[in-house]
Image (tube, rainbow, N blue to C red):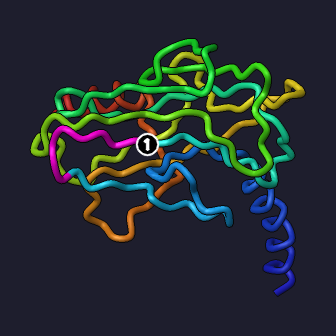
Amino acid sequence: MKRLAGLLVLLIPLSASAWEEPILWLTADAYPDEHGELYDCSYDVESPFLTIPVYLFAETIGAGVETVAGVEFRLDHLPGLAQGILVTHTWHTLLVDGDPAVGVALTFDPPLAADWRVALGRVDLFVLSTTALGDDWRFGVAPSLISGELRLVDGDGVEHRCVGYGFVLNCTDEPCTCGPYLATTAAEAASWGQVKLIY
């Protein structure tokens, strides 16, 4: 019993610190719930020639972040023309370096106020075909392939590692899970390719 109590004392600070990291997440809702609930992280593609707006937010509750001066991330597993989707993006800054499919850095000058949640931009998915995508297409916010980082820089220049969340198109598993998103790195993909060559 004493061992269990000691283990719990060690685990409580670890679980508390895990929630102090900012979260970068995606939603179909331009005005998400003010109580911090993450929802609308899925969309069913039912008809062609419509645009699905997917908004990128930074969740900063408990992270000690009052302003956001920059973020670095990538959008992993974005659908594309092969899936019948044309992707465009609009960020809340003109200071953009990179491609969101590989790695992008956004700088906000002046920094954005981040009381608890701040909008960083939007990805628009224009549907050309409803049949090419299939079910359960999951994409999400992941570390940049350029730097290997998923981070937020606050107005004081302090870097914060972030947790990225996902988004699902044509979800069949209810409820659809929003995240955390686990991306496949380039090294993991190469390793898996080598394993498949053995067989």
Q: Is 37 left or right of 3, judged from the image as shown? A: left
**Farthest left residue?**
131
Q: Is 75 left or right of 106, judged from the image as shown? A: left
Relative height, residue 101 to residue 114 (above, below): above
How dense is the environment of label 1, judged by Cα within 10 Å: few (below 14), some, or many (20 and up)? many
Queried whether the magenta region covers residue 51, the answer comes back as yes
- Residue 153: quarter of image: top right
Observer-nearest of 77 and 106: 106
Circle 1: element type:
strand
Quarter of the picture holding the C terminus:
top left
Queried whether the magenta region covers residue 119, the answer comes back as no
Q: Position of residue 169 (x, y in %)?
A: 30, 50
Relative height, residue 162 to residue 40 (above, below): above
Residue at figure coordinates x 31%, y 33% from the top left: 192
Q: Position of residue 112 (x, y in %)?
A: 75, 32
Residue under label 1: 54
The prevailing secondary structure element of the residues shown in magenta is loop
- Residue 88: quarter of image: top left
- Residue 197: quarter of image: top left
Which residues make up the magenta segment? Answer: 46-53
Label count reads 1
Residue at figure coordinates x 18%, y 42% from the top left: 133
Residue at figure coordinates x 22%, y 38% from the top left: 127
Q: Position of residue 109 (x, y in %)?
A: 76, 19
Identify residue type, mark 1.
Answer: Val
